[in-house]
């Protein structure tokens, strides 16, 4: 489904969101989805509206290029009409396919890999063993640059107790565990022994086996069985996407103030931006992305790293 965005510089972004939602509610389905955010669903497509400090961000989507142009036109005309006190310019990007979002071009991806600390021997061999043992599923593994980012975040946070939801063959767990102090611990949750068995010899070789407490079973059960008190400094969520909202609900109260929650795949290949995708995974990811951004227990930043990474720090 084609998508197009417009970043409109303005002093009144939140006010325009309210005006557009209230006015368009007469002819379309229009709702406020949070502070300074809303969505309008027309017959020919949708437009999501987000206000930042000095911008109104519009994302239009429609099944065809013609209908996309119709959505852009109606939103632009109304916005310009509401802007009686300032001159605003609405410039839409060329349409792109929402389900094939390429955030980083391959050349840039190669360049940034070449200029980040490379994966060491153990991680490299773990990646090879994962490809050999799991075939196409190996794509679930975090990339070397994301692994290096996790390791750096754990060190920067000075984390001692960490949780991981979604271990697979243990690459990200290894990155997290080795950034913990010698007496630190990583509670690692997964449902599969077939995949986590591959991890064990590599954790052993990296000298972090003792720090990792692997729990096999649905991660929600494992999390809910933990005392509901702030005890963890770091959490990484990279498992079944439909459970992301529930994972965050369980993890946030268990983070200490200053603790960091990291979520992987928050773009779901670009499909979260495209209202044509309405599977449970996409709906859950949109819910969690919206909820974290307006959760007043957290400071939140979404990064265009690989498939999208959100960092949420507990206040
Ligand atoms: C994307 S992979 C994790 C990749 C891993 N972080 C890495 O870097 O290699 C997702 C993992 O989540 C696990 N998983 C799926 N549903 C789960 C659930 N309900 N509870 C716990 N783990 C689950 C899968 O078995 C799989 O190993």
Image: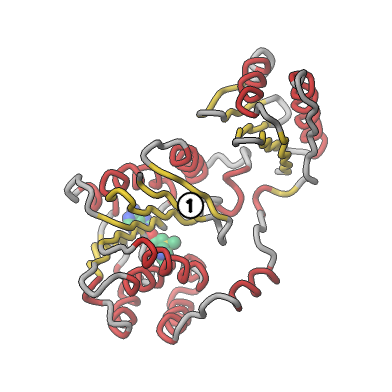
Q: As drawn, is 100 to the left or to the right of 203?
A: right
Say if residue 214 shows up in the picture: yes
- x then y, percent, for residue 210: 21, 75
* Foreground pick, 293 / 222: 293
Residue depicted at x 82% and y 35%: 66
- x then y, percent, for residue 280: 47, 42
- x then y, percent, for residue 71: 75, 30
Ligand 1 within 8 Å of the CB at mark 1: no
The N terminus: image quadrant: top right
Quarter of the image for residue 4 reads: top right
Say if residue 136 shows up in the picture: no
Residue depicted at x 27% and y 50%: 256
The C terminus: image quadrant: top left
Q: What element does badge 1 sit on?
A: strand
- x then y, percent, for residue 232: 26, 55
Quarter of the image for residue 161 reads: bottom left
Which residue in the protein does label 1 denote?
310
Instruction: Name the quadrant where ligand 1 sits.
Output: bottom left
- Residue neighbourhood size for the residue with mark 1, other residues' Cα within 10 Å, grouped as few (<14), some (14–19), many (≥20): many
* Foreground pick, 142 / 304: 304
Residue depicted at x 41% and y 53%: 240
Residue depicted at x 78% and y 44%: 93
144 in relation to 76, above or below: below
Quarter of the image for residue 68 reads: top right
* Foreground pick, 90 / 227: 90
């Amino acid at each position: 489904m084609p998508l197009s965005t417009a970043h409109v510089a303005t002093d009144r972004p939140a006010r325009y969101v309210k005006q557009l939602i209230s006015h368009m509610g007469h002819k379309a389905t229009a709702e406020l989805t949070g502070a300074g955010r809303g969505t309008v669903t027309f017959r020919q497509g949708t437009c999501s509206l987000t206000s930042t400090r000095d911008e109104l961000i519009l994302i239009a989507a429609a099944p065809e290029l013609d209908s996309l142009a119709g959505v852009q036109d109606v939103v632009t005309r109304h916005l310009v009409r509401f802007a009686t006190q300032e001159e605003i310019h609405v410039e839409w990007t060329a349409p792109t396919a929402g389900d094939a979002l390429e955030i980083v071009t391959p050349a840039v991806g190669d360049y940034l890999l070449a200029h980040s600390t490379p994966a060491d021997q153990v991680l490299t061999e773990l990646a090879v063993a994962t490809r050999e043992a799991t075939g196409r599923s190996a794509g679930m593994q975090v990339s070397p640059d994301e692994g290096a980012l996790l390791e750096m975040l754990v060190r920067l946070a000075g984390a001692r107790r960490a949780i991981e939801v979604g271990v697979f063959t243990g690459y990200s767990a290894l990155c997290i565990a080795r950034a913990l102090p010698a007496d630190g611990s990583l509670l690692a949750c997964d449902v599969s022994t077939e995949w986590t068995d591959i991890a064990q010899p590599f954790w052993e070789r990296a000298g972090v086996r003792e720090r990792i407490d692997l729990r096999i079973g649905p991660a929600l059960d494992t999390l809910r069985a933990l005392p509901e008190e702030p005890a963890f400094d770091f959490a990484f969520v990279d498992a079944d996407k439909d459970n992301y909202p529930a994972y965050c609900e369980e993890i946030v109260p268990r983070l200490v103030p200053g603790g960091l929650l990291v979520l992987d795949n928050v773009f779901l290949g670009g499909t979260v931006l495209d209202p044509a995708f309405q599977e449970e995974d996409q709906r859950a990811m949109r819910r969690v992305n919206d909820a974290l951004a307006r959760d007043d227990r957290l400071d939140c930043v979404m990064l265009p790293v690989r498939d999208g990474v959100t960092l949420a720090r507990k206040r």
